[in-house]
């Protein structure tokens, strides 16, 4: 493994660690942060660490706040264990002022707070308004903004880049056939809703309803009754369709596990085992046996839908 961890300490000093025992790094299309777990040998006890940058083959793959860190000593050797989430996890912990926010852009939304080390796509179009309910996280507000903007769902690219439009690059990462370890498919129906009924602005039910064709095909009956959603006052059916699409997330998936790591990021085009698709989940693991990557491709309303 060619791993480097740069540890930033509470006293403003820095340690560079390269004797990695094992690591796991997870990025998911619907998760607003990367998640790193790493264990490394150190020459001395690790100082109080507050931030970690993780490099694989000299490429930065993670930059985040340390959630937990410990250092143990056995037979004269120190072992540091670090758990970290990308700085974009702050999107879950900050809230906008409740109420109506007119003429919202991605810039204006993200500039509400100066989130450290978080960047975002520039020059995105404005939506007419964003309605923020009490206790709504910035991430939930981003989801609403993205859906109203283009019917999409936000995602985070390396290291903490907020994206709201699809990737358009033409490069495809090709997984060599002799590197493939295993392939698999999956299905997830736990959250699929069959119908949404919504009251009107006066609180009267029976005015707005929408059914989920996928649930009908699967024989699923899960009906949700909701109050009028002021987020979509001018397009009530969008309030229903967004919830149905959210319930369909990760419905079908394909996974290819291979030896090594090619450098792909979320929503990059990957070709493997005769199939080319946009990657939705990247699980990279490494130890003394080498590095293994599992790329998962979701097929749902937001991923590989075209």
Image (tube, helix red, strand yellow):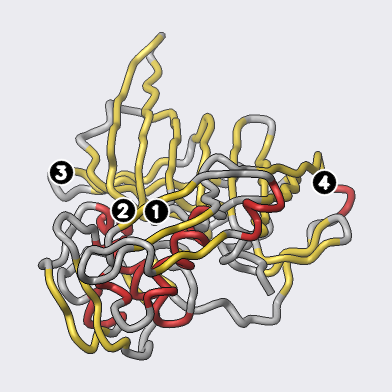
Q: List the residue tagged with mark 3.
A: 10
Q: Nearer the viewer, residue 179 or 26?
A: 26
Q: Which of marks 2 and 1 is nearer the N terminus?
A: 1
Percent x, y of residue 280 = 60, 58
Q: Are marks 2 and 1 in contact (CB under 8 Å)?
A: yes
Q: Residue at x 33, y 18 (%)?
A: 72
Percent x, y of residue 21 = 52, 29
**Is 35 drawn above or below residue 241 in the view shown?**
above
**Is 27 drawn above or below residue 19 in the view shown?**
below
Between the C-alphas of marks 3 and 2, the distance is 20 Å
Q: List the residue tagged with mark 1.
A: 33
Q: List the residue tagged with mark 2.
A: 89
Between the C-alphas of marks 1 and 4, the distance is 27 Å
Locate the N terminus and report the quarter of the image it occupies.
top right
Count neighbours of disc 3 (C-alpha within 10 A) and say few if under 14, some if 14 to 19, many if 20 or more: few
> Which quadrant holds residue 83?
top left
Between the C-alphas of marks 2 and 4, the distance is 32 Å
């Amino acid at each position: 493994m060619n791993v480097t961890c740069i540890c930033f300490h509470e006293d403003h000093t820095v340690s560079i660690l390269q004797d990695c025992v094992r690591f796991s790094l997870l990025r998911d299309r619907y998760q607003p942060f990367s998640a790193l777990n790493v264990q490394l040998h150190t020459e001395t006890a690790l100082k109080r660490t507050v931030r970690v940058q993780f490099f694989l083959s000299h490429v930065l793959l993670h930059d985040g706040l340390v959630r937990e860190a410990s250092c143990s000593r056995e037979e004269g050797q120190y072992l540091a264990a670090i758990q970290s989430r990308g700085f974009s996890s702050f999107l879950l912990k900050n809230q906008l002022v409740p109420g109506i926010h007119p003429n919202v852009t991605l810039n204006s939304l993200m500039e509400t707070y100066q989130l450290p080390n978080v960047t975002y796509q520039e020059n995105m179009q404005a939506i007419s308004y964003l309605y923020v309910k009490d206790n709504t996280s910035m991430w939930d507000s981003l989801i609403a903004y993205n859906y109203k903007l283009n019917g999409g769902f936000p995602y985070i690219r390396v290291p903490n880049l907020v994206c709201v439009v699809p990737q358009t690059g033409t490069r495809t990462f090709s997984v060599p056939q002799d590197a493939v370890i295993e392939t698999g498919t999956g299905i997830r129906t736990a959250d699929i809703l069959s119908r949404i009924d919504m009251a009107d602005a006066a609180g009267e039910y029976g005015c707005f309803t929408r059914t989920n064709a996928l649930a009908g095909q699967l024989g699923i009956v899960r009906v949700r009754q909701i109050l009028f959603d002021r987020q979509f006052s001018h397009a009530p059916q969008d309030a229903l369709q967004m919830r149905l699409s959210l319930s369909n997330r990760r419905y079908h998936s394909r996974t290819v596990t291979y030896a090594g790591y090619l450098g792909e990021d979320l929503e990059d085009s990957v070709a493997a085992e005769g199939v080319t698709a946009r990657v939705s989940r990247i699980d990279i693991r490494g130890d003394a046996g080498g590095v293994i990557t599992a790329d998962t491709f979701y097929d749902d309303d937001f991923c590989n839908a075209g």
